[in-house]
Amino acid sequence: CDSASDFEAKFRTLLTRLDVVEGEETWGQIDTALKGLTSLVQAGATKFETFVPTMKQAVKHINSAIISERTRLSGTALTLMEEMAKQMETRFTPISDMIFPSAMKTCGRANKVFVTRGVNSLTTVITYAHVPEQTPRICDAASTDPNKTVRASAAKLLMSIVSCCTVPELTPHLTLVEGAIASGVVDANPDARTTARQSYEIYIKRFGNRVEQFHAGLSATAKKYLKIGATTSSAASSLTGAAAAAQRLPLRDRISAQRANGKPSATPAGGATDAQQAAAPSAAATANRPKPMRPMARNAPLVAKKGSAEAVTLSLSGESKDPEPAPKAATTATASTGIDSLLMSPHGTSKPTLVRMFSEEPALADKPAHDSARPSASPTATAHESRAPSPDDKADADAESVAPDNEPSATTPPLAT
């Protein structure tokens, strides 16, 4: 389009092709003519002052194509509408009054393809051209239309109106917008309710000075769905004191908070010094500290216990010290585990007494009998067998504290001949 006259000449050619009845043989011709108009719009025909009066001559054919049952033809007409809104922006208002109602009819179709395409095209028109004059039509469809599909689609268009239109453009229609949102949040269609709640969130951010007035006109059900009462109660609860908040805490949390703050315990009746109060937490911590478990050895070493070794030493030296009595089981275990150390020869030889006895004394029967009345000085004596010598026998105990190598112990049984 080099000039307005060029545009008018090309438009008359396309209008002749549009001026036919839609049918099986003509719908393709109409579709081609609509695509030609779209090309003229994209080429810059909207910059001419004669564009709007000239395009009004084709509005009837455009509306007919938009509401057509043929998805391809309807889509081409909606595309033409989108391109005019993109190129003209706010100057699209005169044409929108003639095309917008037909486009909204596609939002109530049973075919979801028509519904989705119609909502997307109208959303594009609102985004670029704003068309605030279509707000009453959209609010009425969102509130009172018996078709739930139309209500859900109109709720989406209303959200676009609230988001895209400027405050001065939307101010004359705020009452209608508030009524549409209030009816949308309690709509039977869940999609309409969800979209209405989103519109409400956008509305209270852009028009904060009307929030209280808007809330006052809402029903109890609408306030419940918008969670207005819950928000108010939460705001009121946040203003309460710290004592009330502490009372609502569980007992375990309150105890943990007191421990974290390090509050001192109550002073006893008699009074306590600062050092005692400072040592109280450490003493309590020490008392509550678990005691370490003593590890148990898997294999007990073959050494004599302290009590047995001390008893043997006392019996050899002849000192008058009474050892502590040991249990019978402990004595038996000592004799079995410490046999190597207890049977060593008192003269320090490397061979134990029994080994030397068997190797050097072939016949023990010829030896004189051992006096059982005399206390045994053999190193094999256990703790319970040793006793302190009397004062009268102290000299004999000192002289005979070490037995001869060839004298058998009292605990050694005689060998049978």
Image (tube, grey):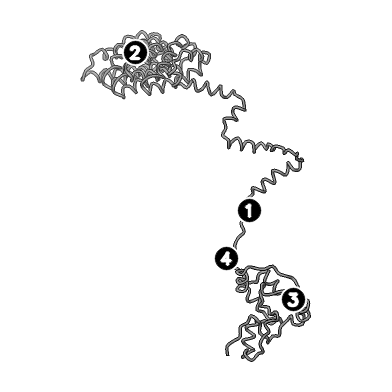
Give 404 or 242, whichever is nearer the viewer.
404
Instruction: Residue under label 2, please give it.
Output: 101
Mark whose residue sits in front, 3 or 2: 3
Instruction: Examine the image and state in which quarter residue 25 appears.
Output: top left
Give 14 or 5, whichever is nearer the viewer.
14
Q: What residue type is labelled 3?
A: Pro
Give 386 or 307, whichever is nearer the viewer.
386
Residue 393 as seen in the image, left or right of residue 205: right
Residues tagged 3 and 4 counted as in contact (Cβ below 8 A): no
Residue 120 x, y percent position in the rendering? 37, 22
Q: Which of marks 3 and 2 is nearer the N terminus?
A: 2
**Disc ID at residue 291:** 1
Q: Which residue is at 29% across, 13% downward? A: 61
Q: Earlier in the sequence, mark 4 or mark 1?
A: 1
Q: Mark 2 falls on what kind of element? A: helix
Mark whose residue sits in front, 3 or 4: 3
Please tell me whether residue 37 is drawn above or below residue 249 in the rendered image.
above
Q: Which amino acid does label 1 sit on?
A: Lys
Mark whose residue sits in front, 2 or 4: 4
Distance (Cα) linking label 2 and label 1: 86 Å
Q: Which amino acid does label 4 sit on?
A: Arg
Distance (Cα) linking label 2 and label 4: 95 Å
Is the residue marked by circle 3 packed among few (<14), some (14-19), or many (20+) residues within 10 Å?
Answer: some
Residue 401 in sight in this render: yes
**Disc ID at residue 389:** 3
Residue 336 x, y percent position in the rendering? 60, 74
